Image: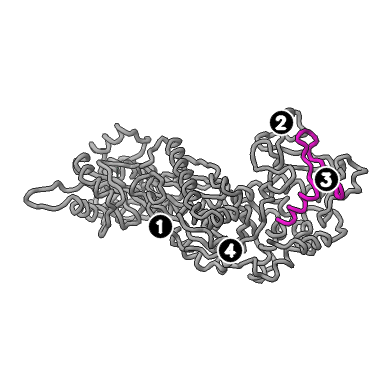
Amino acid sequence: MSAEEVHVVFTPSGRRGRFRAGTSVLDAARGLGVDIDAVCGGRAICGRCQVEVSEGEHAKLGIDSRADHLAPAGPGELAYAREHGMREGRRLACTACLVGDVVVDVPPESQVHRQVVRKEAEVRQIELDPVVRLYYVEVREPALERPSGDLRRLREALEREWGLVGLEVDPEALRALPGALREGRWGVTVAVHDGTAITAVWPGYHDQALGIAFDVGSTTVAGHLCDLSSGEVLASAGAMNPQIRFGEDLMSRVSYVMLNPGSQAELTKVVRECLRKLVGELVAAAGARRTDVLEVTVVGNPIMHHLLLGIDPTPLGVAPFALATDEAVRLRARELELKVHPGARVYALPLIAGHVGADTAGVILAEGPHLSDELTLLVDVGTNAEIVLGNRDRLLAASSPTGPAFEGAQISGGQRAAPGAIERVRIDRETLEPRFRVIGTEAWSDEPAFEGTLVTGICGSGIIEAIAEMFLAGIVTPAGVIDGSLASRTPRIVRQERTFGYVLSGAQPRIVITQHDVRAIQLAKGALYAGCRLLMDRLGVERVDRIRLAGAFGSHIDPFHALVLGLVPDCDLDRVSAAGNAAGTGARIALLNRAARTEIEEVVRRVEKVETAVEPRFQEHFIGAMGIPHATDPFERLAAVVPFPRRTEAGAGAGREGRRRSRA
Ligand code: FES
């Protein structure tokens, strides 16, 4: 080693090199391509570039690394530490200079492309690389002898300091520029969108860049406010979709628009109002301002997507269910009247087909089936079930008309998932006595702590468990008939005209699972299973490696009971799991990682769409799937872990009914 050269190793990247003594740590890092954040361009203002010397003898690296191998902090670093505080041992990479051999650790929060922590270990991680970035620059003052405009001098500074060239500028940003430059004494922070456009300008150093990921569902709208520089979710909020007053489900809203010319504008207006209100709630919860929000992403089913963007949804109500566009849509936030920063942009994820929307694109992005060799079945259950099947070679998608039964509608004691709704059910195989739990209470109904709990109805996950447990206890036959002969064994079996019901809760309101309820669930699950099977047929497979249940309902249903009921094809129980709000997560990924946008646009283009309505085998699969768990599929993998009651009628009665009731 020559006298003026020092050896530096960066962790965790492991990059190493030799530099002249006196080189700043940031310059050394840049020279080696080590990822260190530096919004203020090395002026000891932003504090983003903090690093730590890893002290000690690093025998393997041949380095005796000491804190004093960095020169003592200069005035800028001391001033930053005084004003903002710095953890013991931390240094600002932009001002700390190398004077001896060191191992420098770059903590996650100082890395530009850090990983965003996701709670679930088995899902893909998000690499932080948002589409909007902030840059602090110091702009040359105007001079009489060298006349040039503020924008020209800003562009010069951005090129000189950050290598940014050819940037366009939003009119709002241009309007703000002269004032910001003078107020900031020629130092300004600019927001650059996608490396191509200046969308915002602030005087001096500004470090707040926020984004919101919206999941616009037909029942609820959810928003997640994220810090674009850390990836952290600062606040989440949800609201009922106010369009519900125009129709409970999607098709009734489309019918409303068809029957009431001009009403589309009203539906668009109310959903935009809802988003605008959520923006207010989110920024208030995070102690931020509306104008800190610079980027918004949106997922939603095709009808929600079209209505939010102000596009006529009526072609989606009739075959061939033509979308106005299946491409990603980029627009200004002000066009959606969101009242965020005037330069903020919106990115709506691409749609897949007439019934398979940007929400499913979000699920794909969050779950990454296209990145795996495993054959994954993704199921997002709602009034329509969106189904995706495939792996890195092929990806297929379809939607299946499950109807609202899974959401508790058309069920005698059914209600939405809300406090008071039965959500968990167990039935003793011998005594046929039930125990249950309701939303909002931890205790089971047979525990003393349950005393006084108000039971208001049963929600979708509760009805799934109730019927699956009734099947396992032998109360419901494989054909889906409530066995009246058991009335001699338990008073819980009650006659209801020509059929029987099972009294789940005798208190007021009395919750009885009726024959009609069982049929409604059979029809819904038959449609779901048939959709899954159609995709498996198309792919030529008999098994899938894993199943992920997405969406609010998918996250609440117990995989075991879902399999017992045959909602989805047979699978190893430990390979069936809840994916949470995967659509919302997909929106968040698109917010935090610009490459994810190109990725999903590319993946969506190669998704093979299967239109269940015209597939001749749909009906055949549907009829077989009316049986519990299935009329002909033995569900061997499930049967290996849970003994089924003996099969008698093999679903024949249900099959007849299924044939009578058309899918429509
Ligand atoms: S780069 Fe901003 S403080 Fe070092």
Q: Residue at x 31, y 34 (%)?
A: 81
Which quadrant of the figure contains the N terminus? bottom left
Q: Earlier in the sequence, mark 1 or mark 4?
A: 4
Residue 406 magenta: no
Question: Is residue 90 positioned above or below 22 on the image?
Answer: above
Q: Position of residue 545 (x, y in %)?
A: 65, 61
Q: Which residue is mark 4?
A: 318
Q: Which residue is mark 1?
A: 330
Question: Is residue 384 positioned above or below 88 on the image?
Answer: below
Q: Earlier in the sequence, mark 3 or mark 1?
A: 1
Amino acid under disc 3? Gly
What is the C-alpha distance between the residues marked 1 and 4?
A: 27 Å
CB contact under 8 Å: marks 3 and 1: no
Residue 506 magenta: yes
> Range of the magenta residues?
496-524
Of residues 643 and 260, which is closer to you in this image? 260
Which quadrant of the figure contains the C terminus? bottom right
Q: Which residue is mark 3?
A: 501
Question: Looking at the image, is mark 2 or mark 3 nearer the viewer?
Answer: 3
Residue 57 in sight: no
- Please tell me how crowded label 2 is: few (under 14), some (14-19), or many (20+) other residues with Cα within 10 Å: some
Question: Is residue 110 positioned above or below 324 on the image?
Answer: above
- Please tell me how crowded label 3 is: few (under 14), some (14-19), or many (20+) other residues with Cα within 10 Å: many
Question: Looking at the image, is mark 1 or mark 4 nearer the viewer?
Answer: 4
**Tag 2 secondary structure:** loop
Q: Position of residue 486 (x, y in %)?
A: 90, 46
Amino acid under disc 4? Val
